[in-house]
Amino acid sequence: MKIKGIESDALNFILKVSESTAPLEFAGLLHADNGVITEVIVLPGTESSSCSAIMRLFMMPNIKSVGSVHSHPSPNIKPSKADLQMFSKTGSHHIIVGKPFDEKSWKCYDRNGYVQDLPVIDSEINNDEIV
């Protein structure tokens, strides 16, 4: 599935939950409808600490993931080696959020750790109208 962007409500959820869980990392999987990321799936059994978040991928419900999201408790939002290993297992779009957890403190990466554009789409727009 070609990903066209992320809904603003989904991004706001990611930013708020990342801020509220700091200094622990937050982690989840991304779900898309009609090519737009609309939801974050938090898997049961996910463990968080100040240096990592471990998702139990075997707990994934019968839903296809298009990628992952996790927070770093610092402003450093570059993927680590462990991040890249997770990226290879969970889809094509991976968001990392860091302090101060605002609209400028996140990036989307491909499975190899290269930055990729991910437009923010107003949640009020009907996904069918997105080209």
Image: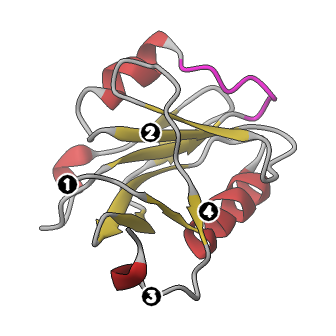
Picture layout, residue 119 above or below residue 87 = below
Residue nearer the viewer, 114 or 40? 114
Q: Residues within 10 Å of mark 3 (few under 14, many from 20)?
A: few
Q: Position of residue 30 (x, y in %)?
A: 38, 57
Mark 2 or mark 1: name the one nearer the start of the chain. 1
Q: Which residue is mark 1?
A: 1
Q: Secondary structure at mark 3?
A: loop
Quarter of the rendering occupied by the N terminus: bottom left
The answer to whether residue 93 shows anywhere in this view is: yes
Badge number at residue 126 = 3
Q: Secondary structure at mark 2?
A: strand
**Image side of residue 85 versus residue 57, left or right:** right
Mark 4 or mark 3: name the one nearer the start of the chain. 4
Question: Which residue is at 62% across, 62% downward?
Answer: 11
The stretch in magenta equals 73-79
Q: Secondary structure at mark 1?
A: loop
Single out the residue that lies furthest toward the top.
Answer: 81
Q: Residues within 10 Å of mark 4 (few under 14, many from 20)?
A: many
Q: Which residue is mark 2?
A: 94
Q: Amino acid at mark 3?
A: Asn
Q: Amino acid at mark 2?
A: His
**Image side of residue 20 versus residue 55, left or right:** right
Work out how far the residue at label 1 is from the one at label 4, CA to CA, in angstroms: 19 Å
Classify residue 111 by image quadrant. Answer: top left
